Amino acid sequence: MTKRGRFITLEGGEGVGKSTNMAFVVASLEAQGLDVVSTREPGGTPRAEAIRALLLDPAPQEPLHADAELLLMFAARAQHLAEKIVPALERGAWVVCDRFTDATFAYQGGGRGMSVERIAQLEAFVQKGLTPDLTLLLDMPLTAAQSRLESRLNSRNEQRDRFEQERGEFFQAVRDAYLARASAEPERFALINAHQPLASVQADILGTLAERIALWR
Ligand SMILES: Nc1ncnc2c1ncn2[C@@H]1O[C@H](COP(=O)(O)OP(=O)(O)O)[C@@H](O)[C@H]1O
Ligand SMILES: Cc1cn([C@H]2C[C@H](O)[C@@H](COP(=O)(O)OP(=O)(O)O)O2)c(=O)[nH]c1=O
């Protein structure tokens, strides 16, 4: 592929403010006159969203095998890349994606304890070298993020999905895996302290975007 646009991902555990800040990142790039495609994983196209529904459904009558979970994440990603992300980047659009493969390393690798080598093999097979240009990792302590998540679930009267039903140790492992990836790849990741008032989080995000985009010019 000839990649002409830029690929930005947002990552972080549950309740850190990813959805809130996705909208902010998209709006700030659009305000600079850029053609922006906003999307999410798992999902982003009709077929990939159908796979998302399978992944998030708590369906207690049949557990989802960890291998099936991992393969479904990459199946959704293959579809999303082929139908949406790659065409957008080729046309010169900027793609902003709510979660991508770092989430697989964090949740399936860290949370579920699956082999990181196996995940890396699938990453190479599905992505063929395509990786984000910038990953904003929203990070905050677990207890504070959990209470944000609870207030969101209560205010919208939502049920917990299959991942949101996991225990504290799972989310601690997810957070640790994200932080380890961020320190291993500081040139791609920007670590954002999400445990601040929203205006401060967004000021940090704006500063990071300005800094990184200047390096790409
Ligand atoms: N910096 C912040 N300070 C306080 N509350 C926040 C902040 N960012 C987001 N929230 C609130 O926390 C809840 C979870 O945020 P959300 O963006 O839905 O998180 P996520 O998508 O990461 O689960 C929402 O009710 C949101 O309004
Ligand atoms: C992309 C991706 C998401 N997930 C999980 C994380 C989330 O719990 C869930 C759905 O993502 P998302 O809708 O971003 O969750 P939330 O907004 O509630 O934080 O899928 C993985 O386990 N692996 C992956 O590769």
Image (cartoon, rainbow, N blue to C red):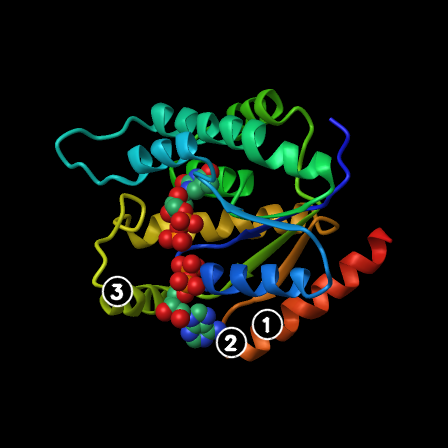
Secondary structure, mark 3, is helix
Q: Quadrant of the N terminus?
A: top right
Q: Which residue is mark 2?
A: 198
Residue at 31% x, 45% y is 163
Q: Is residue 38 above or below residue 148?
A: above
Is residue 16 visible in the rendered structure shown here? no
Q: Are marks 1 and 3 in contact (CB under 8 Å)?
A: no
Task: Please state which of the two labelled residues, at mark 1 or mark 3, is closer to the viewer.
Answer: 3
Q: Which residue is mark 3?
A: 156
Q: Amino acid at mark 2?
A: Leu
Q: Is residue 17 above or below residue 66?
A: below
Is residue 102 visible in the rendered structure shown here? yes
Find out if the beta carbon at label 2 lies less than 8 Å from the nearest ligand 1 atom: yes
Measuring from the top left, give residue 67's x and y in whole percent.
Answer: 37, 24
Measuring from the top left, give residue 144's x and y in whole percent.
Answer: 38, 70
Dot 3: within a 10 Å radius of its alpha carbon, few (fewer than 14), some, or many (20 or more) residues?
few
Task: Please state which of the two labelled residues, at mark 2 or mark 3, is closer to the viewer.
Answer: 3
- Left or right: residue 93 versus residue 67 is right
Q: Quadrant of residue 24?
A: bottom right
Measuring from the top left, give residue 112's x and y in whole percent.
Answer: 38, 37
Residue at 57% x, 27% y is 82
Q: CA distance from mark 1 to mark 3?
A: 24 Å
State the mark number for residue 202: 1
